[in-house]
Amino acid sequence: MEVQPLIDHLSRYVTLSDVEISLLKSRITFRKYPRNQFVVQQGDICRHESFVVSGCLRTYHIDRQGNEHIIMFAVEDWWTSDLGSFISQTPANYNVQCLEPTLLIQFSQENLETLYQEIPVLERFFRIILQRAYVAADKRIIQNFSLTAKERYLEFRNQYPQIEQRVPQYMIASYLGITKEFLSKIRHQLMTE
């Protein structure tokens, strides 16, 4: 399997030597998932941090009433997991499900900790990634409080144009916190403007 997409991704933030790349390769696993397969299920313990080589996934929570709430999507060159579960090794709050056939590069918690010792610059990389994820999550919370549904949809389209064509509209509606009917109405308004 080809590890180059991960190396390219890492190299945008840190520099790895050939020896470090070899060490990295020895500590990762590749996993192919078919469409609709779960990488993590709510209530299970998340065993891997995953880098998306190909495919599209959604992370969502099912509430007590059985309603789905999509938290995020992940496509090529993104990371996905239930991070809280992965770090604490406690039951996951989220499901991570493949929306397309998916290839992931995965790090177990044990292998990631070993890599931090073997390649200290990886701790810096993951710190940067976590900081960026925190900022994005914080921005999303503010947008949910302060933007209209139409403004949130326009922001989603602008920020993630590659996702809108790959996922069903009802999932985008769930991500935006609105009904699929309301999203349809917004889209119709935009086409007539």
Image: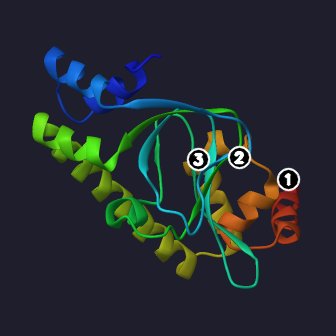
Residue at the spot of label 2 = 164
Residue drawn 23% across the image and 18% down it: 22
As rendered, which of 167 and 191 lies closer to the eye? 167
- Decide: marks 2, 3 in contact (CB < 8 A)? yes
Q: Which element carries disc 2, helix, strand or loop?
A: helix
Q: Amino acid at mark 3?
A: Tyr
Image disc number at residue 191: 1
Could you tell me which quadrant the C terminus lies in? bottom right
Residue drawn 74% across the image and 59% down it: 171
Whole-angstrom CA distance, mark 2 to mark 1, is 16 Å
Q: Which callout, 2 or 1, points to the residue nearer the camera?
A: 2
Q: Is residue 103 visible?
A: yes
Q: In the picture shown, does residue 115 fall above or below 95?
A: above
Whole-angstrom CA distance, mark 3 to mark 1, is 19 Å
Image disc number at residue 160: 3
Image disc number at residue 182: none
